[in-house]
Image (cartoon, rainbow, N blue to C red):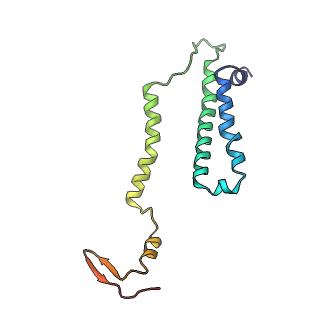
Amino acid sequence: MVVWNLRLFEAPWGWLFLMFLTTSYVIPVPLWLFRRVRRSFTWMLWTSLLVNVGMWTERFLIIVPGLVRKGPLVFDYGTYRPSPIEIMIVVGTLALVPFLLLLFSKFFPLIPLWEVKEGQKLIDHVQVGNVEVPALVKEH
């Protein structure tokens, strides 16, 4: 209960808790009630980014205020500051996702082959190696 009171009513944790509630629930959830927002790539991108910010803030609020509060243990508590190693781990994990996506796209096509074939239905010539030959059948 002491940590919850710290999170809700003491600065700066109270402001972070309000930011968490606003970015995770108050803004995105009512917007998702509208079909126009759910069908728009841009709106969904921004609301999902808001939810990501809110979820990160929630995880921060779960861990850090509890570590700041002086308890019955003999440890010396203080404000959390990430070390350079921790920062590099976070940046590395954030960079790992695009790297794995690029590695996947190197071996597997990201564009389905049926879409490529569909665009070739009305062509008159087909490229075979370095030679351009007339198409045998022109589909309509």
Question: In this picture, is 93 found above or below 129?
Answer: above
Residue 21 in the figure: left or right of residue 120: right
Q: Is residue 45 left or right of residue 108?
A: right
What's the residue at 67%, 56% (across, down)? 36
Of 42 and 131, the residue lying toward us: 42
Q: Is residue 56 left or right of residue 115?
A: right
List x then y, in percent, for residue 137: 39, 88
The answer to whether residue 40 is above or below residue 71 is below
Q: Nearer the viewer, residue 130 or 109?
A: 130
**Nearest to the observer: residue 136 or residue 103:** 136
Q: Based on the displayed image, in which of its 4 quarters is residue 108 positioned? A: bottom left
Q: Residue at x 66, y 53 (%)?
A: 37
Q: Is residue 103 above or below residue 21?
A: below
| Image x and y of residue 133, in percent | 29, 82
Residue 98 located left or right of residue 5: left
Q: x and y percent of residue 138 in the render?
A: 41, 86
Q: Quadrant of the image for the N terminus?
A: top right
Quarter-of-image position of residue 89:
top left
Residue found farthest to the left = 130
- Give the total number of marks visible in the rendering: 0
Residue placed furthest toward the right? 1
Residue placed most toward the observer, 9 or 81: 9
Position in image of residue 39 (x %, y %):
63, 58
